[in-house]
Amino acid sequence: MIIKQHHYLNSTWKDYSSRLNSEKCQLVLVFGASECVLNPEIFNKLKSIYPNADIVFSSTSGEILDNEVFDDSVVATAIEFENTEVRCVQTNTKRHTTSLETGQFLMNQLSAADLSCMFVIADGTKINGSELVEGLNSKNEYNVPITGGLAGDSDKFEQTFTGLNNVPSQGNVVAIGFYGEHIQIGSGTLGGWDEFGHERTITLSDKNVLFEIDNKNALGLYKQYLGDYVDELPGSALLFPLSLRLQGTDDHMIRTVLNINEDDKSMTFAGNLPEGSKVRLMKANFDKLIEASSGAAINSKTGSGNTQPDLAILISCVGRKLILQDRTSEEVEVVKEIFGDHTTISGFYSYGEIAPFFKSGSCGLHNQTMTIVTFTES
C-alpha cells in the first residue's frame, strides 16, 4: 500500500511527497469543509491527478491530518493498493423507501466471497444511521467488518454533502468494498465518558425520539440531573449523553441528544433507542475522553496483528470537538503517539461513527466516540 496526501488550506494546495504512481491509484478519500468540497475545482484537480481512481467525498465538522485538526480545509488521501481490489458504489436516500433498504442495497451490490471489509460514508442529515447499519448487517452474508461515518457540517446540523466521482451533493451514501486476503482491517471505538446513576429501562420511544424511561417522562428525569446546565438546553446536553445497552446484549453504545421538545416532553437523539433497552446517564471527563482515543488506537491495531498499520482513518464525533474545544488536538496527538511515523493518518469529525462492537463484532452506529479504522496490506 502506497499513500500520498494533499492538503487544501487558505486556497492553497500542499502536496506531500510520495512514490505513489498516480496512474495506478485506485482510491482517493477526500474529507473537507462543506464550502470547500462543493467547489468544483477541488474535484477537477484531484481527478486530473488521479484519472483512474474512485474519488470519495465527505463534508466534515473538522479535518484530521497526521497529528493536527483543521477547519475550513480539505484533506485528500490517495491510495495505491498492490494486492487488493477496490470497488465503490453510491446510492441516494431518494432511491429507497427507508434507510434500512439503503443499507441492504449497498451490501447486496458489494457482497462477494472474497470481500474482506467495507467502509461506508453516509449523508449525516438525511439518513437514519441506526437503520442504515441494520440494513448493512442484515445482508452481511460473509460477516465482514463494516466501518465508516456520517458526514458533518461544522456545528450547524443543517446539511451535509457526500459523493463518488463527482462534486458531492446531499443524500448520497457511498460504500467501498476491499477484496482479497492481503488486506487487513482493524477498528477501535471508545468514548471515555463517566456513567452515573443506576441502569434504567426505555419504556416509550419512536426510533430516535425518546418519551419515557421507567414509565416516567424522560425529559423531566433528564433535567433532574442537569442542575445548573438545565437552562442551557439543548446545547448543554452534549455534556450528558446516554449509555445504551440493547435488550439481550452486552454491547454498549452512546447516544447524543440533538434536540428537546417542551410541548410533548420528548428528546431526539442521534440514533435509535429501542423500547426495552437499558440506559444510564453519562457525563464528560476531559482526560478520559482523550485517554479513550489512545485506547481506540491500541484496539484498532489488533486487526493488523499488532503491527504498525499502513493507514489509520480517525472518525471522531463533532460533540467531542465541541466539548474539548482547545484540547481537541490532544485526542489526535495521543493517537499519533501510538501509531508513530510509519502510519499515515487521516480523518474527520462526524455526525456519527460506524464500527463493530468490541464484544459481538456486529456493526453499530456510535455517537460521541473516537473511532479508528486501520488498513494494512501484506
Image (tube, grey):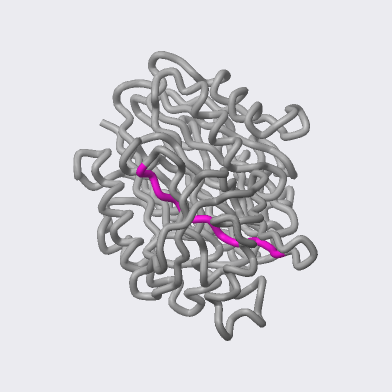
Taking the spot 38% from the left edge, 44% from the top edge, the residue there is 251
Type of secondary structure dominating the magenta stretch = strand
**Most extreme residue toward the top, as rendered?**
113
Q: Is residue 197 above or below residue 179?
A: below
Quick check: 46 left or right of 315?
A: right
Taking the spot 55% from the left edge, 37% from the top edge, the residue there is 50
Residue 53 in picture, x, y percent from top left: 54, 32
Taking the spot 42% from the left edge, 52% from the top edge, the residue there is 371
Residue 19 visible? The answer is no
- Tell me the quarter of the image containing the C terminus: top left
In this view of the protein, which residue sits in the foreground, 202 or 89? 202
**Does the magenta-highlighted stretch encompass residue 79?**
no
Quick check: 59 left or right of 244?
A: right
Q: Is residue 204 above or below residue 163?
A: below
Instruction: Tell me the magenta residue range.
Output: 250-260
Taking the spot 27% from the left edge, 57% from the top edge, the residue there is 341
* Number of dots carrying numbers: 0
Q: Is residue 52 above or below residue 166?
A: above
Residue 271 in picture, x, y percent from top left: 59, 49
Quadrant location of residue 229? bottom right
**Most extreme residue toward the front, as rendered?**
215
Quick check: 199 left or right of 108?
A: left
- Tell me the quarter of the image containing the N terminus: top left
Quadrant location of residue 236? bottom right
**Does the magenta-highlighted stretch encompass residue 259?**
yes
In this view of the protein, which residue sits in the foreground, 70 or 79? 70
Residue 242 in picture, x, y percent from top left: 50, 60
Q: Is residue 26 above or below residue 271?
A: above
**Most extreme residue toward the bottom, as rendered?**
228
Residue 103 visible? The answer is yes
